[in-house]
Amino acid sequence: MARSEPSAVSAAPPEVIPRPRPQLPTSGRLAVVVLGLVVLVAVVVPLMPLPSPRTVDTARSLEPPLAGRLLEELPELEPREGEAADAWIDRGFGELGPISRLMVRARVAICGRWAVSGLLGRDELGRDLCARICWGARVSLAVAVVAALVTLVVGVPWGAVAGWAGGRVDDAMMRAVDVLNSIPLVFLVVFLVTVLGEDSIRLALDSLGIGRLAIFFLVVAAVSWLSMARIVRGRLLELRDATYVEAARASGASPARILLRHVVPNLAGTVVVTLSLTVPRMMLFESFLSFLGLGVQPPDVSWRLLANAGLKALIPLDPAWWLFLFPSAALAVTLLALGFLGDALEAVLDPRRHR
């Protein structure tokens, strides 16, 4: 009886189902849209056909939204007789950089002296609130950007090195953070206001091109990274002794591979969430510094400064509600968008969410 040949058909390899990439939640996408619009307005506001944020018109003091002429010709958007060519820019918009000056000139060249005014009402000096909110977005977002950059550039490496190195390096670096945290913030701000208020020091700083706003950003940078350094250090201490990190060391993986493959992905979510909390805190901190005389001062404008001024205008007999509502709404929506974006990015970046 003939023997049958063995089957030459080998078992097919199991089908590998690719893991779906994590998608940004709907709340995160909406936050990206909102923040994108806010940033776009802050960047292109010199091109927008709005009145200058500093122009005073007491005849239209506390004019409600949509109460006056929405389209009008503004004589302040041109130099007066005997003035320098760009004096009208400094008078109406303050000290601007070269790119912003070029954008303002382009706006006048395109739209002439016509502007859309009174959309959101006017303040007690007759200044257009919509223009002031749009220009105030620049300062408020600049505070957020400075806080985020310093937190990422200083706080994350500081905490990461301290947590990964351990030992005496960790002790020395974290004691420096403890010293900075031990300085009372109010004392620091009052000290800076007192010292910088001296005429000789103020003139010396002005000669170097360092204004009050630059000192304000310096103070924001000095206090924004401390919490991030502590949180990152604690997370690194946890990750350094994790089982999968020990297994990677035992398998002969290089320190660079361990950091890039195992540590950074597990650290990214923590950094994003902490950053989403730090940036709103620094934007609110700007109001505190302005109250003590070190932050944004009139005639410069920020959202928090506008909200504080609007709160004072809420008198019982004739409340100018628009002065408080619109700046507060802009600030609240931006802070909420930052919070939603941080939560959404943490959900996408944290590997523990995808197991």
Image (spheres, rainbow, N blue to C red):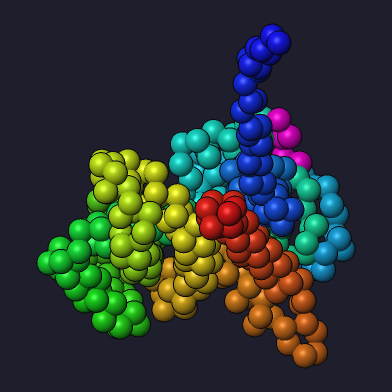
Q: Which residues are magenta?
A: 110-114
Q: Position of residue 224 (x, y in %)?
A: 38, 65
Q: Which residue is located at x 52 percent, y 38 percent?
A: 101
Q: Which residue is located at x 30 percent, y 55 percent?
A: 246
Left or right, 15 with respect to 213, comes to right
Left or right, 84 with respect to 5, comes to left
Q: Quadrant of the N terminus?
A: top right
Q: Position of residue 44 (x, y in %)?
A: 63, 41
Q: Position of residue 20 (x, y in %)?
A: 66, 41
Q: Which residue is more in the foreground, 66 or 350?
A: 350
- In which quarter of the view is residue 31 placed? bottom right
Can see residue 320?
yes
Q: Is residue 198 magenta?
A: no
Left or right, 134 with respect to 282, comes to right
Q: Quadrant of the C terminus?
A: bottom right
Q: How many marks?
A: 0
Residue extending furthest top? 2
- In which quarter of the view is residue 197 placed? bottom left
- In which quarter of the view is residue 255 placed? top left
Can see residue 272?
no
